[in-house]
Amino acid sequence: MKFYSKFAAALGVASLSAMASAGPLSDYNLILFGDLNTNSNVKVYGQAVIGGDLKSSGEFGSHLTDSAFNATNNVEVIGNVNSPNLTIQNGYLGYGGTKTIGNLNCNESGLPQNSCVRALDDVTAVSDKLDSFYDVLSAESDFYRSFGLTGDVSGTTLSYGGLATDLVVFNIAGADLFANNANWQLNFGNAANVVINVSGTNLSNPGSVNLSGSGFTNSTYSNILWNFYDATSLNLGNGWKGNVLAVDADVKIMNDIDGSLAAKSYTGSGQIHHYYWDYTPPETEVPEPSILILLMAGLGMLGLGRLRRRQ
């Protein structure tokens, strides 16, 4: 039976890759189910959707240079907007509540000044979209948490030396991740994507944890997802490398995130850079028909071989 289980597992991994498609974090740089409340000017490079209030100075859409983003709501705020200084680099900010804005800059070419903030046409539609994002991202988080293809954690090194070319995960306790003076290294082998599952509800970086070791580079940020599946409070300290999935957490950071963020709320300062998580697990783990045929053929050949040996 060992061969059967190994064969099925290998085909399951193959089908996973074939059926994966991009999800919300491939389109949105910032997804919040509550408030954005920073104590200084926040800069979000890509699209943003905010389920609560925007209570911050900020700049949005600085890297939305494609014409497809022109004249569209690239920032959607279901609640109120209260901003001393607000810059919209491309398109509009749409809001569902009230707005109080001190200085407003509208930088899309041809768009009149003070015209890039407008009421949402359909607040319910944006709210429903955000609800669906929560369901999808929560399901993704649960999937990654239970994913069986894992790498090794040794000291402050995350390393995988297997044959996977699609996805590999690491599992680590938050207390270990945020240990004092930790300088993490990452090696996910030939896998295209890596998820780092982090346990713990109230997590805080003491300020001496660094992600500056090998494996954390500009070329890999889009391929890294931190899955804080238990977190309700998450302080990332002075900066973070890779995408952050923490749908139930109040997230705080005092510098930049090199990746997209999905969280309950966001406070602090810094920039959210335009690296996107383009991988989403399949809706079902049932293999594609061609793979099922291959599996059945393989099992049939094994059965025929055993029958011949008995004769």
Image (spheres, rainbow, N blue to C red):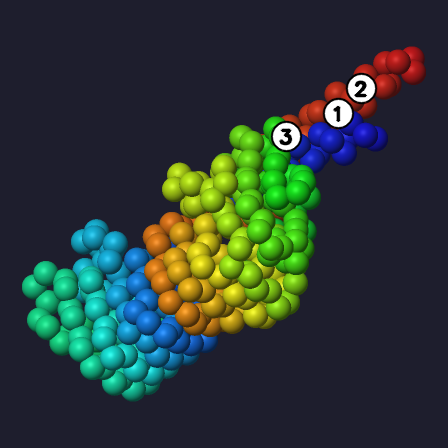
Q: Residue at x 50, y 41 (%)?
A: 213
Q: Residue at x 18, y 78 (%)?
A: 103
| Residue contact between numbered discs 2 and 3, judged by CB atoms under 8 Å | no
| Residue contact between numbered discs 2 and 1, judged by CB atoms under 8 Å | yes
Q: Nearer the viewer, residue 244 or 285?
A: 244
Is 182 positioned to the left or the right of 91 in the image?
Answer: right
The residue tagged with tag 3: helix, strand or loop?
loop
Q: Amino acid at mark 3?
A: Gly
Inspect this view and state whether residue 96 appears. no
N-terminal label among 3 and 1: 3
Q: According to the image, label 2 marks what residue?
A: 304
Q: According to the image, label 3 marks what residue?
A: 162
Q: Amino acid at mark 1?
A: Gly
Q: Amino acid at mark 2?
A: Leu
Is 96 positioned to the left or the right of 107 in the image?
Answer: right
* Location of residue 79 with respect to 165 vertically, above or below: below
N-terminal label among 2 and 3: 3
Measure the C-alpha gap from mark 2 to mark 3. Answer: 32 Å
Q: Residue at x 13, y 76 (%)?
A: 114
Coordinates of residue 227 in the picture (x, y in percent): 57, 55
The residue tagged with tag 1: helix, strand or loop?
helix
* Location of residue 267 with respect to 9 vertically, above or below: below
Measure the C-alpha gap from mark 2 to mark 1. Answer: 6 Å
